[in-house]
Image (spheres, coloured by chain):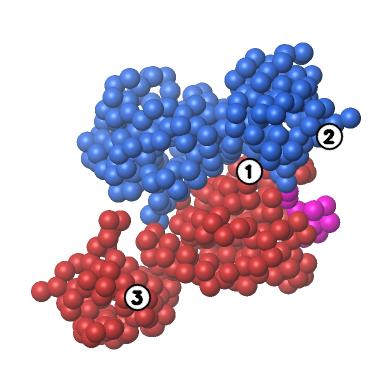
Chain colours: A blue, B red
Amino acid sequence: MGEELTEPGGGVRLYVEAALAAGAHLTPDNGQAHYLLHVMRAKAGDRLNLFNGRDGEWRARIAEVSKRSCVLECEAQISEQREAPDIWLVFAPIKKTPADYLTQKATELGVGVLQPVFTRRTIVNRVNIERMRINAIEAAEQSGRVSVPETREAVKFEKLLTQWPAERRILFCDEAGEAQPVADALRGAPEGAWAIFTGPEGGFDPSERGALRALPNVTPVSLGKRILRADTAALAALAVWQAIRGDW
Amino acid sequence: MGEELTEPGGGVRLYVEAALAAGAHLTPDNGQAHYLLHVMRAKAGDRLNLFNGRDGEWRARIAEVSKRSCVLECEAQISEQREAPDIWLVFAPIKKTPADYLTQKATELGVGVLQPVFTRRTIVNRVNIERMRINAIEAAEQSGRVSVPETREAVKFEKLLTQWPAERRILFCDEAGEAQPVADALRGAPEGAWAIFTGPEGGFDPSERGALRALPNVTPVSLGKRILRADTAALAALAVWQAIRGDW
């Protein structure tokens, strides 16, 4: 009477926007319905997991199947909504392929918010937020997360700093100046909400570096002497943050 | 009288195999000659940097240009050969695009040896070592390293363990068992030579995990509860190792 839907990496998990509760019925979006019915060849009675970033993870069964869509029924909660470490990644936009990669990896590494920021030396001048969002959802589904990182519209550096929430600490990856080794800086640093700032290829310009260092809760750090690409620096900083201040 | 050859990321650096010493003349390989003459449109007198992994970094000038090649002359040593942290990455082969990415990023993150290993759950059954080597050289040139990681032929897991150099410590990224958080494990761990072991999607199988844990200098560690892709886990572990035990 119905099978567990699985992929090579494990059971099928889908992110949905609707509320999840025992007995709730919901209709997957067109892409999800296509995936379930035509890629996974799901039938009525098959089972999968659902999460929405608010209600934990739920077991669901395919209650009805029509030609183009299906209805999912929530059966039981498998896990509660877990609190994740509160970490944002603020990064200068990069080209399409590295940007896809960065979004996927940062999601696996548990980032909470992806905030692209246009700096003076940023070469890429457009960010496809919809594409970022699709990549983030897919990576969240595959990584076992019960939330999807928020993908924010790109903003200018000056504007971001003007509106910066003062209590959120900044780990500033500064390739150009005096900065502590990242592990030393994080070891003694307080708990709480953080954001990692990484610049474009070539780094932040001097005025941007000055503006960042003038903020109250900023910790400038070094990621060693080798030159890291923008996406490498972002992922490395996120991994080290998770290991020392996050939930690893 | 000649220009500094530069790319958007900085001055041109080339890895060569020949010995570097004041006044030494050398001929770049065909690919490098094409790059210099036809991509960079270099002329006699232009300058670039050279390294070979042994003699530090050298300033060189293009001494002669012919139709298809050129001769480079070493002028002065700019920096001595630096000792890099002794860290290997032992990883189960992955598909082409993620493998390219892993090689590039691991090189930027300062890896010394890239050792692919076939495990029981490894799906990819061929490794293009020549392609890995080309990616590693390119990433080393761009990252400011004065060495290129050694790219070793893929071996079977059992064979690798039989020949394992006992004094080289292993950071075993174990998603399946009791393991310390990676930062805690590394903080108290000794200096010296290390290798990071990361498995394929789905992890090492139980017998492989047992064999690894039976080695004398093995530290099993956890990278948190989210499921990381094979390449994400490798890069994250390398970043954390560099931050805590390496040269960051």
- Disc on the earlier residue, 1 or 3: 3
Q: Is residue A195 left or right of residue B217?
A: left
Residue beneath disc 3? B32
Label 3 lies in what chain?
Answer: B
What amino acid is labelled 3 in the image? Gln
Q: Which mark is residue A3?
A: 2
Q: For mark 1, does the 10 Å Cα neighbourhood hold few (<14), some (14 to 19), or many (20 or more) residues?
A: many
Q: For mark 2, does the 10 Å Cα neighbourhood hold few (<14), some (14 to 19), or many (20 or more) residues?
A: few
Identify the residue at image location x=57%, y=60%: B96
Q: Quadrant of residue A247?
A: top right
What amino acid is labelled 2 in the image? Glu
Looking at the rendered structure, the secondary structure element under dot 3 is helix
* Label 2 to label 1: alpha-carbon separation: 26 Å
Q: Which residues are magenta?
A: B202-216
Quadrant in which the N terminus of chain A appears: top right
Q: Which mark is residue A84?
A: none
Q: Is residue A212 magenta?
A: no
Quadrant in which the C terminus of chain A appears: top right
Q: Which mark is residue B228?
A: 1
Identify the residue at image location x=43%, y=73%: B53
* Label 3 to label 2: alpha-carbon separation: 56 Å
Q: Are marks 3 and 2 on the same chain?
A: no
Whether residue B101 is situated above or below residue A206 in the rendered picture: below
Foreground disc of the pair 2, 1: 2
Label 1 lies in what chain?
Answer: B
Label 2 lies in what chain?
Answer: A
Q: Position of residue A31 (x, y in %)?
A: 60, 32
Q: Position of residue A125 (x, y in %)?
A: 30, 39
Looking at the rendered structure, the secondary structure element under dot 1 is loop
What amino acid is labelled 1 in the image? Leu
